[in-house]
Image: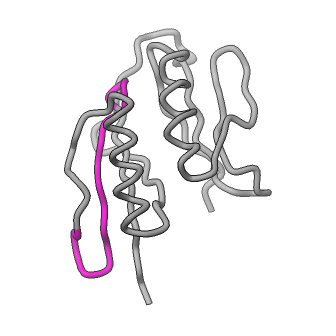
Amino acid sequence: MIGYVTIGSNDLDKACAFYDALLAEVGAKQLMGMDRIKFYGTGKENAAMIAVCTPYDEKPQACGNGNMIAIPGGSREGVDKLYAKAIELGATDEGPPGERMPIFYGGYVRDLDGNKLCFFDMKTG
């Protein structure tokens, strides 16, 4: 249902170093890109991707209030691992991993540009 989401950065090289290391934890890598945008994914056909870019209008990047990218951790341990890796890479805490409801376990950070990320494990049935 989702092809890709795009988040902005004021320092694309720094953002790519962050996402190269973080997304490697879930088997994703940079798949393609141009000078101002890089796409990350698993390489599986039609799988969702995350794109990191400098804004097209050449104005400074700004985070959208209420915008967030949720990245599946695959398990509670996977969520903990992604959260720890993000913090190690310089992300800031927005809520440590924990059970938010019986079917949802999540941890929240902001990346180097302030974009909000959620690492989650959800069991719905």
Most distant residue in the top direction: 58
Pick the front one: 81 or 115: 81
The prevailing secondary structure element of the residues shown in magenta is: strand
- Left or right? Give the position of 116 relative to 18: left
* Residue that appears at 33% across and 28% down: 90
* Residue that appears at 76% across and 56% down: 44
Membership of 106 in magenta stretch = yes
* Residue that appears at 58% across and 43% down: 24
Q: Position of residue 64 (x, y in %)?
A: 34, 34
Q: Please provide the residue range marked out in magenta.
A: 99-114
Q: Where is residue 85 in the image (x, y as percent from the top left)?
A: 39, 42
Q: Quadrant of residue 97?
A: bottom left
Vertically, is 125 above or below 118?
below
Q: What colouring style does the render use?
A: one colour
Vertically, is 37 above or below 118?
above
Looking at the rendering, in which quadrant would you find the N terminus? bottom right
Most distant residue in the bottom direction: 125
